[in-house]
Amino acid sequence: ELLSDYGGTGHSFDDVLKKRQQEHGPCSRYIAETMAVSSRESHFSFDLTKGEKVSSVVIYSKGDSGAEISIRDSAGTVLIEPTTVKRKAGVDNAHYSVELDSSKLPNGEASFKVIATGAAKEYYLITVGVSTA
């Protein structure tokens, strides 16, 4: 069914993404970022406000070469060690995702940076579920 964003009668991309994110835990808001990852470092930053926590970090990809993805705090301290995100043989290619261990991220007012490097140019969708602490 074609998404309503593209002229179809299906749900909007936003609705579908929010539903998928809630499968990984409760969230009051979510952050979605598309990253083009190559041999050069790619990154994006996101912030939490007082009373918030990260409930999930999910990375979607159809990339064959893979990427190393980590999360640091605003001081540059590695909170989630580099994790290889790469499809494995026999995995449903249309729905491949990896969930990072969001329990390693502190609650409350904080800034984070998602950092990725890869061997070839590929695209990744990073989603961050945010809930109340």
Image (cartoon, rainbow, N blue to C red):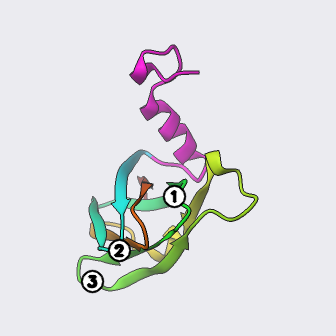
Examine the structure image and report whether residue 17 is included in the region drawn in magenta: yes
Q: First in sequence, mark 1 or 3: give its number.
A: 1
Q: Which amino acid does the dot numbered 1 rest on?
A: Val
The residue lying at 48 percent from left, 39 percent from top is 18
Asked which secondary structure carries label 2, the reply is: loop
Q: What numbered label is drawn on residue 127?
A: none
Asked which secondary structure carries label 3, the reply is: loop
Residue 126 versus residue 8 in the image, above or below? below
User: Which quadrant of the structure image shows residue 48?
Assistant: bottom left
Q: First in sequence, mark 3 or 2: give its number.
A: 2
Q: Which amino acid does the dot numbered 2 rest on?
A: Ser
Give x and y (percent) for residue 86: 57, 66
Q: What numbered label is drawn on residue 39?
A: 2
Give x and y (percent) for residue 12: 45, 26
Span shown in magenta:
1-27
> Could you say which is closer to the camera, residue 126 or residue 122?
122
Could you tell me how far apart the alpha carbons at marks 1 and 3 are, in whole angstroms?
21 Å
Q: Can you identify the residue that label 1 sits on?
A: 58
Asked which secondary structure carries label 1, the reply is: strand
- The quadrant of the image that shows the C terminus is bottom left
Q: Can you identify the residue that label 3 sits on?
A: 76
User: Which quadrant of the structure image shows residue 40?
Assistant: bottom left
How many numbered discs, if any?
3
Could you tell me how far apart the alpha carbons at marks 1 and 2 are, in whole angstroms?
21 Å
Please tell me whether mark 1 or mark 2 is closer to you in this view.
Answer: 2
- The quadrant of the image that shows the N terminus is top right
Residue extending farthest to the right is 90
**1 and 2 marks in contact (CB < 8 Å):** no
Task: Sort mark 1 into few (<14), some (14-19) or many (20+) by Cα contacts within 10 Å.
Answer: some
90 relative position to 106: left or right: right
Could you tell me how far apart the alpha carbons at marks 3 and 2 are, in whole angstroms?
20 Å
